[in-house]
Amino acid sequence: MRYIAEIQRWPIGEIVVVDARQYTPWWAVVGAEHVVILSDSSKQLEKVSSGVPSTWIHRESGPEALVAALQSLPPATHQS
Protein backbone atom coordinates (compact mmCIF):
# COMPACT_ATOMS: atom_id res chain seq x y z
CA MET A 1 0.00 0.00 0.00
CA ARG A 2 1.41 3.35 -0.99
CA TYR A 3 -1.61 5.63 -0.57
CA ILE A 4 -4.49 5.82 1.86
CA ALA A 5 -6.85 5.32 -1.10
CA GLU A 6 -5.45 1.79 -1.47
CA ILE A 7 -6.77 0.65 1.92
CA GLN A 8 -8.93 -2.46 1.49
CA ARG A 9 -11.00 -1.59 4.55
CA TRP A 10 -11.02 1.33 6.98
CA PRO A 11 -9.02 0.75 10.20
CA ILE A 12 -11.97 1.68 12.44
CA GLY A 13 -10.96 1.31 16.08
CA GLU A 14 -7.60 -0.22 15.18
CA ILE A 15 -3.94 0.67 15.67
CA VAL A 16 -2.14 1.52 12.43
CA VAL A 17 1.65 1.23 11.96
CA VAL A 18 2.87 3.42 9.12
CA ASP A 19 6.08 4.85 7.69
CA ALA A 20 6.52 8.59 8.35
CA ARG A 21 6.27 9.29 4.60
CA GLN A 22 2.75 7.81 4.60
CA TYR A 23 1.64 9.58 7.78
CA THR A 24 -1.41 11.79 7.37
CA PRO A 25 -4.05 13.16 9.75
CA TRP A 26 -6.54 11.25 7.57
CA TRP A 27 -5.71 8.08 9.53
CA ALA A 28 -7.93 9.44 12.31
CA VAL A 29 -10.63 10.48 9.84
CA VAL A 30 -10.85 6.92 8.47
CA GLY A 31 -11.17 5.56 12.01
CA ALA A 32 -7.71 4.62 13.27
CA GLU A 33 -7.67 4.70 17.05
CA HIS A 34 -3.91 5.29 17.24
CA VAL A 35 -1.10 5.63 14.70
CA VAL A 36 2.42 4.33 15.36
CA ILE A 37 4.78 6.15 13.00
CA LEU A 38 8.21 4.80 12.04
CA SER A 39 10.60 7.71 11.54
CA ASP A 40 14.08 7.93 10.02
CA SER A 41 15.13 11.14 11.72
CA SER A 42 14.67 13.33 14.75
CA LYS A 43 13.35 16.04 12.44
CA GLN A 44 10.43 13.79 11.48
CA LEU A 45 9.83 13.00 15.16
CA GLU A 46 9.18 16.69 15.76
CA LYS A 47 6.42 16.74 13.14
CA VAL A 48 3.05 17.80 14.55
CA SER A 49 0.55 14.96 14.65
CA SER A 50 -2.41 17.31 14.01
CA GLY A 51 -4.36 15.99 16.98
CA VAL A 52 -4.16 12.37 15.85
CA PRO A 53 -3.32 10.04 18.76
CA SER A 54 0.13 8.90 17.68
CA THR A 55 3.46 7.52 18.79
CA TRP A 56 6.62 8.32 16.82
CA ILE A 57 9.56 5.92 17.05
CA HIS A 58 12.94 5.80 15.32
CA ARG A 59 13.05 3.13 12.64
CA GLU A 60 16.62 2.32 13.70
CA SER A 61 15.36 1.36 17.17
CA GLY A 62 14.47 -2.07 15.84
CA PRO A 63 11.52 -4.36 16.37
CA GLU A 64 11.83 -4.21 20.16
CA ALA A 65 10.87 -0.52 20.14
CA LEU A 66 7.85 -1.21 17.95
CA VAL A 67 6.69 -4.06 20.19
CA ALA A 68 7.20 -1.90 23.30
CA ALA A 69 5.23 0.96 21.73
CA LEU A 70 2.35 -1.35 20.81
CA GLN A 71 2.30 -2.95 24.26
CA SER A 72 2.17 0.47 25.93
CA LEU A 73 -1.07 1.39 24.14
CA PRO A 74 -4.51 0.55 25.49
CA PRO A 75 -6.18 -2.27 23.55
CA ALA A 76 -7.86 -1.16 20.32
CA THR A 77 -11.64 -1.10 20.35
CA HIS A 78 -12.16 -2.68 16.88
CA GLN A 79 -15.48 -0.90 16.37
CA SER A 80 -17.10 -1.41 12.99
Image: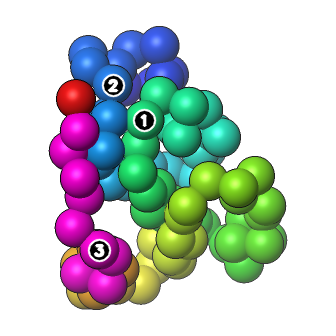
Which residues are the magenta region? 71-79
Q: Which mark is residue 74?
A: 3
Mark 1 vs 2: CB contact within 8 A = yes
Looking at the image, residue 14 sits to the left or right of residue 44; the answer is left
The image quarter containing residue 70 is bottom left
What colouring method underlies this structural image?
Answer: rainbow
- Circle 1: is it few (<14), some (14-19), or many (20+) Cα within 10 Å? some
Question: For residue 31, which numbered disc appears in the image?
Answer: 1
Residue at x-position 20% and y-position 44%: 78
Against 30, is 37 above or below? Answer: below
Number of numbered discs present?
3
Say which amino acid is labelled 2. Trp
Q: Mark 1: which amino acid?
A: Gly
Q: Earlier in the sequence, mark 2 or mark 3?
A: 2
Res 11 label = none
Q: Nearer the viewer, residue 42 or 77?
A: 77
C-alpha distance separating marks 2 and 3: 20 Å
Task: Residue at 32%, 84% (x, y): give it.
Answer: 72
Q: Position of residue 48 (x, y in %)?
A: 79, 61
Chain-order first, disc 1 or disc 2: 2
Q: Which mark is residue 10?
A: 2
- Say if the magenta span includes residue 45: no
Q: Can see residue 56?
A: yes
Magenta stretch encompasses residue 74: yes
